[in-house]
């Protein structure tokens, strides 16, 4: 629409130049961060959300005013702003009332596998090699399904203090990104006696294995 108005000489290059002062840094930041960020997560690009949303709203108002020619009264401006706000709210309703489990953060296939597992067993093991323990929080929704969770530090590999873990026929083990899988298998076999491993699911920062 802006290009069309520019061709019709209802929009000047000067107007676009003013917009580029804000939009160019936002675009460059967006492209740079999406190239270098380790994960596809919104938090890395949130600093430019305000600029992008502001430019979008201002652009719609400006293009609407130009298209409607002599719309300059304050009441019409308020009406346009309220109309845009209502449209945004309308399209947000789906996200507020939709099934959260279907989003990419909640991994519905993982949840289904865990529900089937917890129908027989209420215990799991989590192995982490992260010294700051931030990755474990992505598994919090699935942890609600268990009564007991045993944590193993994949950096120290201390001996298992609760030997009753080896009494189960099978256990679900979370192997966090960064953990040496072969070390984890050797450790589990040595400490608990479990020998067979089967990949059950892949999650945000961990893989779930059934050990027997």
Image (spheres, helix red, strand yellow):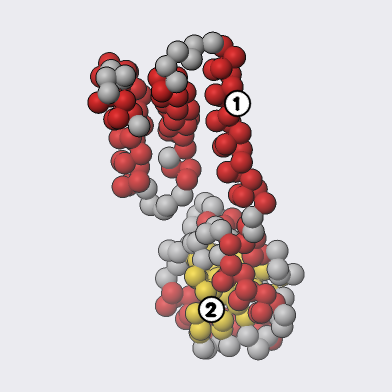
Provide the secondary structure element on which disc 1 rests: helix
Quadrant of the rendering where the N terminus is positioned = top left
Report crowding for label 1: few under 14, some 14 to 19, many 20 or more residues within 10 A (C-alpha): few
Q: Work out whether residue 149 can be spotted.
A: yes
Mark in front: 2 vs 1: 1
Give the quadrant of residue 12: top left
Give the residue drawn at x 34%, y 22%.
19
Q: Which residue is mark 1?
A: 82
Q: Is residue 88 left or right of residue 122?
A: left
Q: How many marks?
A: 2
Tell whether 29 sits left or right of 104. left
The answer to whether mark 2 and mark 1 are in CB contact below 8 A is no
Q: Quadrant of residue 65?
A: top left
Residue found at x 49% / y 62% = 205
Quarter holding the C terminus is bottom right
Q: Residue at x 31, y 19 (%)?
A: 10
Q: Residues within 10 Å of mark 2 (few under 14, many from 20)?
A: some
Q: Secondary structure at mark 2?
A: strand
Q: In the drawing, does residue 91 fall left or right of residue 182?
A: right
Q: Which residue is mark 2?
A: 200
* Vertical placement of residue 176 versus 8, above or below: below
């Amino acid at each position: 629409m802006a290009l069309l108005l520019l061709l019709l000489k209802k929009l000047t290059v000067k107007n676009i130049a003013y917009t580029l002062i804000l939009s160019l840094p936002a675009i460059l930041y967006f492209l740079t961060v999406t190239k270098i960020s380790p994960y596809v997560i919104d938090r890395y690009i949130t600093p430019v959300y305000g600029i992008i949303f502001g430019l979008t709203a201002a652009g719609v108002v400006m293009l609407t005013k130009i298209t409607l020619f002599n719309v300059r009264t304050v009441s019409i401006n308020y009406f346009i702003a309220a109309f845009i706000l209502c449209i945004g709210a309308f399209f947000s309703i789906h996200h507020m009332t939709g099934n959260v489990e279907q989003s990419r953060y909640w991994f519905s296939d993982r949840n289904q596998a865990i529900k089937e597992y917890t129908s027989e067993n209420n215990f799991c093991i989590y192995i982490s090699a992260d010294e700051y323990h931030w990755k474990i929080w992505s598994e919090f929704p699935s942890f609600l399904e268990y009564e007991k969770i045993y944590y193993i530090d994949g950096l120290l590999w201390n001996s298992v203090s609760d030997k009753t873990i080896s009494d189960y026929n099978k256990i679900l083990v979370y192997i966090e990104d960064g953990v040496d899988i072969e070390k984890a298998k050797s450790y589990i076999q040595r400490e608990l006696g479990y020998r067979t491993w089967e990949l059950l699911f892949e999650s945000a920062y961990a893989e779930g294995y059934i050990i027997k």
